[in-house]
């Protein structure tokens, strides 16, 4: 392929036009282009270009003066790129694909460097290593540029910090100035977690609690498992500021355990850092937790792990200057049937994947301008180009912008974006029986069922819409019915708890609520918010929000059998659990598959309420009318941050892994708290 021509650009551009200035999308993939073929004078005429595909060429670098100031999507996969400094010229860049290019190998250099150290040399090892990495590590086929030296320095400091050694800044060269001036941040709507049905706008955060609280467990009789604080992390900070104690964290989910093949973290439980995520770690000690981490750079690099999904393709990402950034660590081969200790958390503009045992942020995905409200995992079976079947863990994340981002965590990039709703997505969940079926619930009062399909060899999804379910109020929680997940879907909404028929063999593709559930008698029974909803076992449902200070346990089968043709149905209550008397909303509850009887919920003071309801559900009727006390209350341990004690905070959600080994709590103050059963 020779130099580009205006005629070729018009042929491969969209929309079709005889003027280059009107082209918005341009596909130049697979043309065997060399770097010198990219004529800046010609390409700068594409004044409105927003999407450019340069993948599958022979590019070694990008010209620094392309003039594409409106570019939002850039695909450069499978080239020979050895320098990414030119990406600074794209201030509007949102999506970047760089897999199949050379990548950093700082971690291998760290292992070699560390092996040569004696104990006496550990004191000065940090500065020596960073200098050594900047001097010796090569990024692709080119010698290190100033920008690359800065990136290597950042990654090197992460590896040093992970070993408990801090770098003396006086010994290290200063980072180079940015190529372009930083843009002023745009004002964006905050998380709309309030009942008023209005367009998204700035809304006040939940109030901050500051009164003191002791760190201990209440209600434990010695026969219950003991849970101890293990890690406290700040990994969702706005603008990567270690002083951020305000970002609200909303949802978390444990990666499903792999029955075969590879898990993100195997039984060895040891992950080696390959990049830097801006995280502060708070070491807990009763009444005196201290900060042991500094604010870290968001830059990262990918290193090939022992086993990959596609052995015949390089799927590692280089360090990116895109506005959507992944920061990653190396993954270990898992054991068959290994239980999951990997949790995904979301809040603010970031999604993090954390190893609960080590407290290390394995991956971090950032999308400036987004505010993530929900995450959900699925495990897909894909067939590689060589015909081998592999398992992928795919993480779906969604929030304020109404987009669903499909994150291939193992490969380390966003492999698909679904423009699902015009308003914010409050929650999402995968079908427990169809690994590609995803429900999304939005502030536009719609729930949509999507079929993601199976990704192709290029990690691309082709999602299709299967059903649209209309609601009369904003849906907050989704829950497929445990005994018949392909037939009915429950949703906790601002106006109550509703149920839809989701059978795909029915002709109607747009449906209204079939039944609304009420939880008490009287005129005020209907229209109560349900902000917590989960199945405890195949039949028993736990719901919260319909009455102050309690969590309701009710029977799906006993309730549904009395339906007839009614559109409003009173639930058959089995028991009520005592909870916080707060009037604040949106504290999500969860259940744990271990023993089919664990219910978890946070509160406005940082406490975690733990209920083992197995003994309640096995009691003969009638059950006690008074609310049942929790099995345990895990009191907020009061860690220290920024020189002050965090005495109280709101725990928005609590989730445990299937074996109830680890418990993760997300707060209103940008703290991820991880507890471990002893």
Image (cartoon, rainbow, N blue to C red):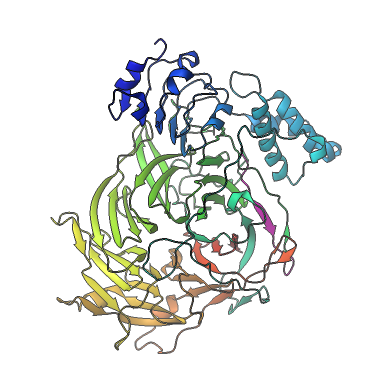
Is 104 one of the magenta-colored residues? no
Query: Residue 444 location in percent, x, y?
Result: 32, 60
Query: Residue 25 location in percent, x, y?
Result: 35, 30
In the depicted structure, whether residue 298 falls above or below residue 76: below
Q: Residue, x 30% and y 54% (percent of image)?
A: 433
In the depicted structure, whether residue 325 falls above or below residue 63: below
Where does the magenta region start and end? 275-288
Q: Judge from the rendering whether residue 637 lies leftward or rightward of residue 559; answer left or right.
A: right
Nearer to us in this view, 398 or 618: 398
- Look at the image and tell me whether residue 359 can be seen: yes
In the rendered image, the residue lying farthest to the left is 507
Specify the quadrant of the image occupied by residue 171: top right
Quadrant location, the N terminus: top left
Q: Residue, x 63% and y 56% (percent of image)?
A: 233
Looking at the image, how many numbered discs can be counted on the residues?
0
Quadrant location, the C terminus: bottom right
Q: Main secondary structure of the magenta part?
A: loop
In the depicted structure, whether residue 49 falls above or below residue 572: above
In the rendered image, the residue lying farthest to the right is 120
- Look at the image and tell me whether residue 535 can be seen: no
In the depicted structure, whether residue 579 falls above or below residue 388: below
Q: Residue, x 43% and y 22% (percent of image)?
A: 43
Is 284 one of the magenta-colored residues? yes
Q: Judge from the rendering whether residue 318 lies leftward or rightward of residue 495; answer left or right.
A: right
Query: Residue 196 location in percent, x, y?
Result: 39, 70
Query: Residue 480 location in percent, x, y?
Result: 31, 62
Q: Judge from the rendering whether residue 102 lies leftward or rightward of residue 588; answer left or right.
A: right
Q: Judge from the rendering whether residue 5 lies leftward or rightward of residue 211; answer left or right.
A: left
Specify the quadrant of the image occupied by residue 512: bottom left
């Amino acid at each position: 392929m020779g130099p580009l021509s205006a005629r070729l650009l018009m042929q491969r551009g969209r929309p079709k036009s005889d003027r280059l200035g009107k082209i918005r999308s341009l596909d130049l993939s697979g043309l065997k282009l060399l770097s010198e073929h990219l004529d800046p004078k010609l390409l700068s005429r594409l004044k409105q270009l927003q999407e450019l595909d340069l993948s599958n060429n022979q590019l070694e670098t990008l010209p620094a003066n392309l003039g594409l100031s409106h570019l939002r999507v850039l695909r450069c996969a499978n080239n020979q790129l050895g320098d990414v400094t030119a990406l600074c010229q794209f201030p509007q860049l949102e999506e970047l694909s760089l897999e199949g290019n050379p990548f950093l190998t700082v971690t291998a250099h760290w292992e070699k460097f560390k092996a040569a150290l004696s104990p006496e040399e550990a004191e000065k090892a940090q500065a020596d290593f960073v200098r050594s990495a900047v001097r010796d590590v090569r990024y692709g086929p080119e010698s290190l540029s100033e920008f690359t030296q800065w990136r290597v320095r950042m990654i090197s400091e992460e590896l040093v910090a992970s070993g408990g050694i801090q770098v003396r800044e006086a010994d290290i060269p200063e980072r180079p100035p940015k190529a372009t001036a930083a843009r002023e941040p745009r004002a964006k709507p905050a998380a709309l977690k309030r009942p008023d049905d209005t367009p998204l706008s700035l809304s006040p955060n939940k109030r901050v609690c500051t009164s003191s609280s002791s760190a201990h467990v209440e209600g434990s009789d010695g026969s219950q498992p003991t849970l101890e604080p293990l890690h406290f992390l700040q990994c969702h900070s706005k603008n990567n500021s270690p002083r951020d104690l305000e970002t609200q964290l909303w949802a978390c989910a444990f990666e499903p355990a792999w029955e075969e093949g590879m898990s993100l973290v195997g039984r060895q439980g040891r992950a080696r850092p390959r990049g830097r995520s801006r995280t502060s770690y708070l070491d807990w000690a009763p009444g005196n937790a201290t900060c042991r981490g500094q604010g870290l750079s968001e830059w990262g690099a990918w290193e090939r792990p022992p086993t990959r999904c596609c052995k015949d393709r390089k799927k590692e990402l280089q360090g990116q200057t895109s506005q959507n950034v992944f920061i990653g660590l190396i993954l270990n081969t898992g054991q068959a049937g290994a239980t999951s200790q990997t949790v995904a958390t979301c809040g603010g503009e970031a999604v993090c994947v954390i190893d609960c045992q080590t407290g290390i942020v394995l991956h971090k995905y950032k999308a400036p301008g987004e505010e993530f409200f929900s995450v959900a995992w699925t495990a897909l079976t894909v067939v590689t180009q060589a015909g081998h079947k592999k398992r992928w863990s795919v993480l779906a994340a969604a929030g304020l912008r109404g987009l669903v981002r499909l994150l291939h965590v193992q490969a380390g990039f966003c492999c698909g974006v679904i423009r699902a709703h015009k308003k914010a997505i409050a929650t999402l969940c995968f079908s427990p029986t169809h690994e590609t079926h995803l429900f999304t619930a939005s502030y536009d009062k719609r729930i949509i069922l999507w079929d993601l399909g199976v990704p192709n060899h290029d990690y691309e999804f082709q999602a299709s819409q299967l059903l649209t379910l209309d609601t009369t109020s904003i849906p907050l929680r989704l829950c497929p019915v445990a005994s018949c997940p392909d037939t009915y879907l429950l949703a906790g909404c601002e106006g109550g708890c509703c149920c839809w028929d989701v059978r795909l063999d029915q002709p109607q593709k747009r449906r209204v609520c079939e039944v609304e559930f009420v939880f008490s008698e009287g005129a005020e029974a209907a229209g109560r918010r349900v902000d917590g909803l989960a199945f405890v076992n195949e039949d028993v449902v736990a719901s919260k929000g319909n009455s102050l200070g309690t969590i309701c346990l009710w029977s799906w089968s006993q309730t549904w059998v009395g339906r007839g043709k009614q559109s409003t149905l009173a639930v058959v209550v089995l028991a009520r659990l005592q909870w916080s008397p707060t009037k604040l909303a949106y504290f999500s509850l969860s259940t744990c598959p271990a023993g089919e009887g664990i219910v978890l919920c946070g509160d406005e003071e940082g406490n975690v309420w733990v209920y083992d309801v197995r003994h309640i559900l096995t009691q003969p009727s009638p059950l006690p009318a008074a609310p049942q006390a929790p099995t345990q209350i895990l009191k907020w341990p009061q860690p220290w941050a920024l020189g002050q004690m965090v005495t109280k905070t709101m725990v928005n959600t609590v989730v445990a892994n299937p074996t109830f080994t680890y418990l993760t709590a997300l707060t209103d103050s940008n703290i991820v708290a991880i507890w471990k059963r002893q």
